[in-house]
Amino acid sequence: MKAVISSTKFDGSLHYQFEADLVQATDREIRVYTPPGVKLLTYRGELMTRSHSLRIFYTDLSWNVMIRWHADWRFEEHYVNIADPATWDGRVVRWVDLDLDLIRRAGSDEPVLDDEQEFERHRIKWGYPEKLVQRVWQTVEQVWQLMRDEKVPFDEQTCLWRPSGP
């Protein structure tokens, strides 16, 4: 089954939209897979995926993760979007990107925080409420610790995941 992934920025403008293969959906978690060569509509224009990726969206957490592998399935990175919790209607995963990303690349022990300047610009431009700003920074700390401790989904077992069947 295909799922549509639709993310916006805080102001409602397009972030990303694409189709992915639904792997699993529960009340709390939606997992989708995209192989290399999937078309993405983005705020930067149309792009194509270069890697295999398993994306995990949570309905009760303020982040989601993309686990990426090179075309030959060598682990590439964990890429975490700090975001509003996702919603799932049985066909579309929707979420709001809140700019900050945590990235841990293959061979690195420490995650890197990305897009701090973008977060600051958007915080001012779009008037992020102070509670949202606090939640974003708390989420960064929580996810950073999960990555350091190699807790699910940042563990070796999750990195061994592969799609099943055609």
Image: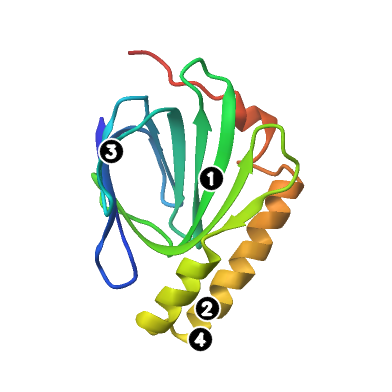
| 97 to 30, vertically: above or below | below
Query: Marks 4 and 2: in contact by CB < 8 Å?
Result: yes
Q: Which of marks 4 and 1 is nearer the N terminus?
A: 1
Q: Earlier in the sequence, mark 1 or mark 3?
A: 3
Residue sitting at 44 percent across and 79 percent down?
123
The answer for how far apart the CA atoms under marks 2 and 1 are is 20 Å
Residue 47 shows which numbered tag?
3
The answer for how far apart the CA atoms under marks 2 and 4 are is 5 Å
**Amino acid type for the residue under numbered disc 1:** Tyr
Query: Marks 1 and 2: in contact by CB < 8 Å?
Result: no
In this picture, residue 37 sits left or right of residue 29: left
Residue sitting at 25 percent across and 30 percent down?
1
**Amino acid type for the residue under numbered disc 3:** Leu
Residue sitting at 51 percent across and 83 percent down?
131
In this picture, residue 46 sits left or right of residue 79: left
Residue 130 shows which numbered tag?
4
Q: Name the residue under label 2.
A: 133
**Position in image of residue 78 (x %, y %):** 57, 41
Q: Name the residue under label 1.
A: 79
